Image (cartoon, helix red, strand yellow):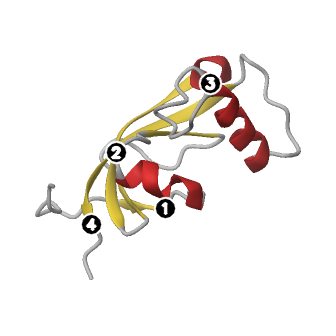
Amino acid sequence: MMSLPDKQPKIIKIPFLERFREPMLKDVKTMTSRTKIYGTKGNWFYAFDAAFVLDSVDTQPFKIILLQWQAEGCSSKEDLLAVWKQIHPRRIFGPNDLLFVHRFHRVGSRKA
């Protein structure tokens, strides 16, 4: 695991459902799709007492995101769709709706 660099990176906050604890800590979930931008490449965030760094942020249509269900930490395309509907119960997303895809990797544990 990598330690924090000498120059402190920008720390951002990205909320995650508890169900993603294990997939994130086991480096299975490596992306999160959002309706807004939470940060930029190189920004760090903490989740489940671990540190993560954003590798990239770009836009992709919802239909392409659904094909990346494993990187989203889900068990299937249908599982990802169910999670998405749980998080966004009032809005229906079409296949061509663009979302912000945040790719990340785990870099260590939170320092006490």
Residue 49 locus on image (x, y percent)? 37, 69
| Label 4 to label 2: alpha-carbon separation | 13 Å
Tell me the tag on residue 27.
2
- Circle 3: residue type: Leu
From the viewer's side, name the closer residue of 80 and 15.
80
Tell me the tag on residue 106.
none
Q: Residue furthest left?
A: 6
Residue highlighted by disc 4: 109
Q: Residue furthest right?
A: 90
- Circle 2: residue type: Asp
Residue highlighted by disc 1: 13
Give the left or right position of residue 57, taking residue 112 as reference: right
Residue drawn at 30 percent across, 46 percent down:
42
Residue 2 locus on image (x, y percent)? 14, 55
Q: Earlier in the sequence, mark 1 or mark 2?
A: 1
Residue drawn at 34 percent across, 63 percent down:
50
Q: Earlier in the sequence, mark 2 or mark 3?
A: 2
- Circle 4: residue type: Ser
Establish if 24 lies above or below 68. below
- Mark 4 vs 1: CB contact within 8 A: no
- Circle 1: residue type: Lys
Q: Secondary structure at mark 4?
A: strand
Q: Residues within 10 Å of mark 2 (few under 14, many from 20)?
A: few
Give the left or right position of residue 63, taking residue 52 as reference: right
Residue highlighted by disc 3: 66
Q: Residue furthest bottom?
A: 112
Q: Residues within 10 Å of mark 4 (few under 14, many from 20)?
A: some
Q: Residues within 10 Å of mark 3 (few under 14, many from 20)?
A: many
